[in-house]
Image: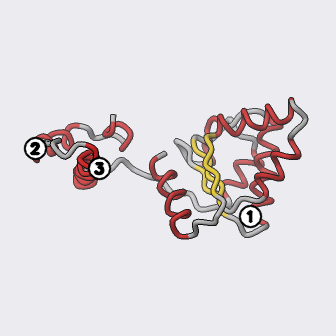
Amino acid sequence: THLLQAIAAESLKQNPKSRVVYLTAEYFMWRFATAIRDNNALTLKEQLRDIDLLIIDDMQFLQGKSIQHEFCHLINMLLDSAKQVVVAADRPPSELESLEPRVRSRLNGGVALEMSAPDFAMRLGMLKLRLATARIDDASLDISEEILNHVARTVTGSGRELEG
């Protein structure tokens, strides 16, 4: 999630006029289901067609044959228009059994990267960056190097676990 948000932020930094949309798969499903129910699906499709970068988080939660069909159509439309699509899931596209074969195939056609848990040096760096950011709001905040090292050694999971 943090990496996807950083991708969105960097895209906007590089080109402030770019149209970037960040959605969770669950929100994407809700938006489409609501649009279909309210007979506004065409309007939603037109809005999404005009974006430059689509970012979908937690792809493993995308459910429903009609929603997946719309998602696949949207990806094809964006990529055919030289737009960018970034999706994230908790496993590779080929292992997302809840997705229709067509969607898995389309996702497999892109670049799939596996992200492992951060090592000690990266965890320590993340903690130091988080501390520096927190000090902007409270300059008196002080956490010793010893405590930062201890937390970086003991919390070995994802960045999400590290941030609590």
At mark 2, the secondary structure is loop
Q: Residue at position x 36%, y 44% from top? A: 159
Q: Which mark is residue 140?
A: none
Quadrant holding the C terminus: top left
Query: Is residue 122 shown above or below 44?
Result: below
**Image-based side of 53 in relation to 157, left or right:** right
Of the two numbered discs 2 and 1 on the same chain, state the one appearing first in sequence.
Answer: 1
Q: Residue at x 80, y 59 (%)?
A: 77
Tell me the SS state at disc 3.
Answer: helix
Mark whose residue sits in front, 1 or 3: 3
> Could you say which quadrant of the image residue 50 lies in?
bottom right
Task: Indicate which label's residue lies in the foreground, 2 or 1.
Answer: 2
Residue tagged by mark 1? Answer: 79
Query: Is 42 above or below relative to 37?
Result: below
Circle 2 crowding by C-alpha within 10 Å: few under 14, some 14–19, many from 20 = few
* Residue type indicated by callout 3: Thr
Callout 1: SS:
helix
Q: Label 2, on which residue?
A: 144
Q: Count up the numbered dots.
A: 3
Q: Is residue 88 left or right of residue 133?
A: right
The residue that disc 3 covers is 133
* Residue 83 figure quarter: bottom right
> Residue 104 at x, y = what percent?
70, 48
